[in-house]
Image: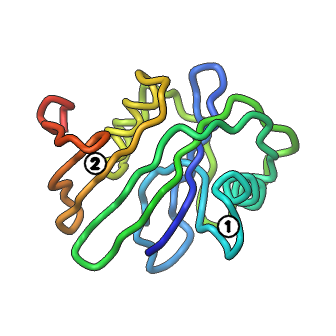
Amino acid sequence: MLQTTLCYLIRDEKTLMLHRIKKKNDVNHDKWIGIGGKLEHGECPEECVQREFLEETGLTLCDARYRGLVTFLSDDWCEYMHLFTATQADGKMRECEEGALEWIEWKRLTSLPIWEGDKVFLRLLETRETFFSLKLVYDGERLARVMLDGRALDTAEWGI
């Protein structure tokens, strides 16, 4: 089972996004995602998100806030993603080896090429202050089932 982190740095109604266009054989190729990566042995999610954010952007998060746990399932993989937001970071942004970094208006995020399940947790980040547990079950690249805090969600209700 894979454990990862993902963080959305939000400033002036924009968020720093990574357009995954540089790595070959990337499951996220050509998708827009937040900044993050895999937990290393002995790391807690908070340490991982700080390390990954610094490695990928050159920025140090000042106020990372743990917002939710997202469980991704498909036929052959399971991932627990620890989801964070932040509003402040120090340092000088640098080029990322995995893709292009760009500030995107928050309201435009769901119109970009992103995973269908990302639309659910982006909406939760926007509308919910409390911690949440989200389960996203995929059939290939199609979002097949969504559960929020242990209860099934109607994806049509969410515009997915």
For residue 87, above or below residue 73 = above
* Residue in front for this viewpoint, 104 or 11: 11
Callouts 2 and 1 close, C-beta under 8 Å? no
Residue where numbered disc 2 is placed: 116
Between marks 2 and 1 in the image, the one whose residue lies nearer the viewer: 2
Looking at the rendered structure, the secondary structure element under dot 1 is loop
Residue 44, position as x, y percentages in the image: 67, 60
Q: How far apart are marks 2 and 1 (CA)?
A: 25 Å
**In the visual, does 25 lie left or right of 154?**
right
Indicate the quadrant containing the C terminus: top left, top right, bottom left or bottom right: top left
Numbered label attached to residue 153: none
**In the visual, does 115 lie left or right of 66?**
left
Residue where numbered disc 1 is placed: 97
Q: How crowded is mark 2: few (under 14 residues within 10 Å), some or many (20 or more)?
A: some
Residue 55, position as x, y percentages in the image: 76, 61
Image quadrant of residue 29?
bottom left
For residue 52, above or below residue 157 = below
Looking at the rendered structure, the secondary structure element under dot 2 is helix
* Residue in front for this viewpoint, 91 or 147: 147
Residue 27, position as x, y percentages in the image: 40, 70
* Residue in front for this viewpoint, 106 or 134: 134
Image quadrant of residue 52?
bottom right
**Residue at left 80%, top 47%?**
59
